[in-house]
Image: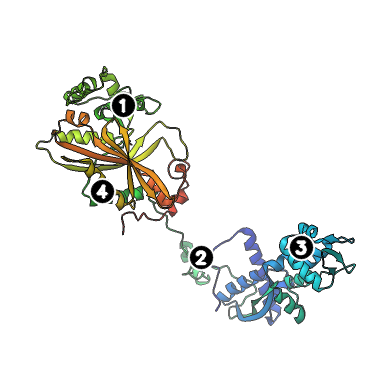
């Protein structure tokens, strides 16, 4: 069956022109001749690509300008190896030409030739008795003809060769059979020496003038592909974030509101019992805001309790013993961790009486003034979880961490003592990475200090266990991305975002 292929609209000008020329040649020929007996010979005689003739015949047949009958022929085409010999000559001739009249040692000859040319060349040239094969290789004849190359070229040009040669080339896997398809072409029921241009649209003018009656309309091509539908694409970070959100929700955690990137130093540092001289509070590590450079309001009585705990301690702590400055606490910054949000939430919780235990989480952006490299950006996303209840212990923290991380596929965990100004004890979290075959650091955790919790007004026996990790690290591992700049920022290839699969974290 022939099918109209003109539905694939257009092509470039050059292609269209070629096609028009082929069409003219075919229709013109049929005006004076009964038939085109062989589309292949016709194409060769008119200097047109056979594929072009085939396309035009299919199209003309669709509009019944011509009738076409299939013809098939078994032909031979060159294999990849055959093609290289048709260009560079057969290996036996290449080898023969590399042997100088005075002879050459085997090693030296081997150096001069491609290994496969040497191997095949030795075998064939030996068989043809062109060379004497020993430790020393020398010529036995003066001159050789490259019959193989000649035959391959003949086949390439569509010329026939004798059966014995075919057999020989086939045995050497230099040619392979192929079915050639062409047509016998005759005038069809709607034949005309020139094609009427088929109309693609029925216009208002066609209707008014009445010329629609004479127009020939192009048939609908129902098998043509429409333009691909473009839609939004979810970024891999957001895919992983959604799965993590689900995991937290399954575990009974509530999401904290993280919609303020700008925070005061007070909530980001002071309320966390982080001293004002701490290096993280330097502008080399933290982005401070120029305008508005300070916060408008803070809960004054709580600020006073925070000041006291820094300066002189209390709650069985000795404090840091330095002069706490309100100006330093007022400075606005881009939050350096989502623990600032956790702190606000714990403060609000402390104001509720009676005390209510809570499980909170957040996943959002934080900012640090860092040198950018393949694993660091000046901004990233933090995943943070906390549990606030009476009498919690380090054992509870370890248990929750095992529960959480096993849900994201990390069930082998190890902990290492660490230091945070706001937690005691603190633990770095390591997970065994099966792919890398080693332990990798995946997060940070701890129990919030009494110096942080008691000034808020939480009951004395309330403990808070918490942990934090980056969203980028697991996303890069899951999606096999090793440069963070390929994941986030202005250098990201949108194609990568469009093609990424869904995230299956937490789905069993
Ligand atoms: N805020 C910590 C960080 O920036 C993470 C953390 C959260 C540590 C909670 C302990 C407890 O890395």
- Which residue appears at 22% of the width and 33% of the height? 344
Tell me where residue 66 sits by quadrant.
bottom right
Foreground disc of the pair 4, 1: 4
Residue toward you, 279 or 347: 279
Residue 123 x/y as whole percent:
77, 70
Residue extending furthest toward the front: 135
Q: Earlier in the sequence, mark 1 or mark 3?
A: 3
Q: Nearer the viewer, residue 186 or 131?
A: 131
Q: Residues within 10 Å of mark 3 (few under 14, many from 20)?
A: few
Estimate the spatial distance between the alpha carbons at disc 2 and disc 4, rounded to whole Å. 57 Å
Count the marks: how many?
Answer: 4
Which numbered circle lies on residue 200?
2
Q: Are marks 3 and 2 in contact (CB under 8 Å)?
A: no
Q: Which of labels 1 and 2 is toward the front? A: 1
Image coordinates for residue 179, horizontal then vertical, percent: 64, 77
Q: Position of residue 403 (x, y in %)?
A: 26, 50
- Distance of mark 4 from mark 1, alpha carbons? 30 Å
Give the mark nearest the N terminus, 4 or 1. 4
Tell me, for residue 332, which label it has, or none.
Answer: 1
Q: Which mark is residue 88?
A: 3
The local secondary structure at tag 4 comes to: helix
* For marks 1 and 2 on the same chain, the one whose residue lies earlier in the sequence: 2
Mark closer to the chain start, 3 or 2:
3
| Secondary structure at numbered mark 3 | helix
The residue under label 4 is 248
- The CA distance from mark 4 to mark 3 is 67 Å
Image-quarter location of ligand 1: top left
């Amino acid at each position: 069956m022939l099918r109209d292929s003109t539905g694939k609209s257009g092509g470039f000008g050059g292609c269209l022109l070629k096609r028009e020329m082929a069409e003219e040649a075919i229709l013109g020929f049929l005006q004076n001749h009964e038939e085109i007996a062989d589309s292949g010979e016709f194409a060769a005689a008119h200097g047109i690509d056979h594929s072009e003739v085939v396309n035009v015949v299919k199209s003309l047949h669709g509009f019944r300008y011509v009738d076409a009958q299939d013809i098939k022929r078994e032909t031979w085409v060159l294999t990849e190896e055959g093609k290289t010999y048709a260009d560079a000559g057969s290996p036996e001739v290449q080898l023969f030409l590399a042997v100088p009249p005075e002879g050459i040692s085997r090693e030296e000859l081997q150096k001069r030739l491609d290994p496969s040319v040497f191997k095949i060349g030795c075998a064939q040239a030996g068989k043809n008795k062109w060379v004497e094969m020993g430790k020393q290789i020398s010529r036995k004849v003066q001159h050789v003809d490259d019959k193989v190359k000649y035959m391959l070229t003949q086949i390439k040009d569509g010329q026939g060769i004798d059966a014995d040669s075919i057999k020989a080339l086939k045995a050497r896997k230099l040619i392979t059979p192929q079915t050639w398809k062409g047509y016998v072409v005759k005038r069809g029921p709607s034949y005309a020496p020139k094609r009427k241009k088929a109309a693609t649209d029925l216009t208002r003018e066609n209707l008014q003038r009445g010329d629609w009656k004479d127009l020939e309309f192009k048939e609908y091509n129902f098998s043509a592909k429409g333009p691909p539908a473009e839609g939004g694409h979810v970024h891999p970070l957001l895919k992983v974030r959604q799965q993590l959100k689900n995991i937290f929700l399954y575990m009974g955690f509530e999401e904290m509101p993280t919609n303020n990137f700008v925070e005061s130093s007070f909530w980001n540092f002071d309320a966390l019992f982080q001293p004002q001289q701490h290096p993280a509070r330097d502008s080399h590590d933290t982005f401070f805001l120029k305008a508005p450079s300070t916060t408008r309001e803070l809960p004054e009585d709580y600020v006073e309790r925070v000041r006291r705990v820094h300066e002189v301690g209390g709650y069985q702590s000795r404090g840091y013993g330095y002069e706490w400055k309100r100006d330093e606490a007022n400075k606005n910054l881009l939050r350096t961790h989502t623990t600032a949000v956790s702190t606000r939430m714990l403060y609000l919780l402390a104001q509720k009486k009676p005390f209510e235990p809570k499980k909170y989480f957040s996943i959002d952006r934080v900012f640090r003034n860092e040198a950018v490299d393949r694993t660091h950006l000046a901004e990233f996303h933090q995943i943070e979880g906390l549990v606030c209840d009476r009498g919690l212990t380090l054992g509870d923290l370890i248990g929750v961490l095992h529960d959480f991380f096993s849900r994201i596929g990390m069930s082998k965990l190890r902990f290492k003592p660490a230091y945070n100004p706001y937690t005691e004890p603190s633990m770095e979290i390591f997970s065994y990475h099966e792919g890398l075959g080693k332990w990798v650091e995946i997060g940070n955790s701890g129990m919030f200090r009494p110096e942080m919790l008691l000034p808020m007004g939480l009951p004395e026996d309330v403990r808070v266990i918490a942990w934090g990790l980056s969203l980028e690290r697991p996303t890069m591992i899951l999606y096999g991305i090793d440069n963070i700049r390929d994941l986030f920022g202005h250098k990201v290839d949108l194609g990568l975002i469009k093609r990424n699969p869904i995230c299956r974290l937490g789905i069993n």
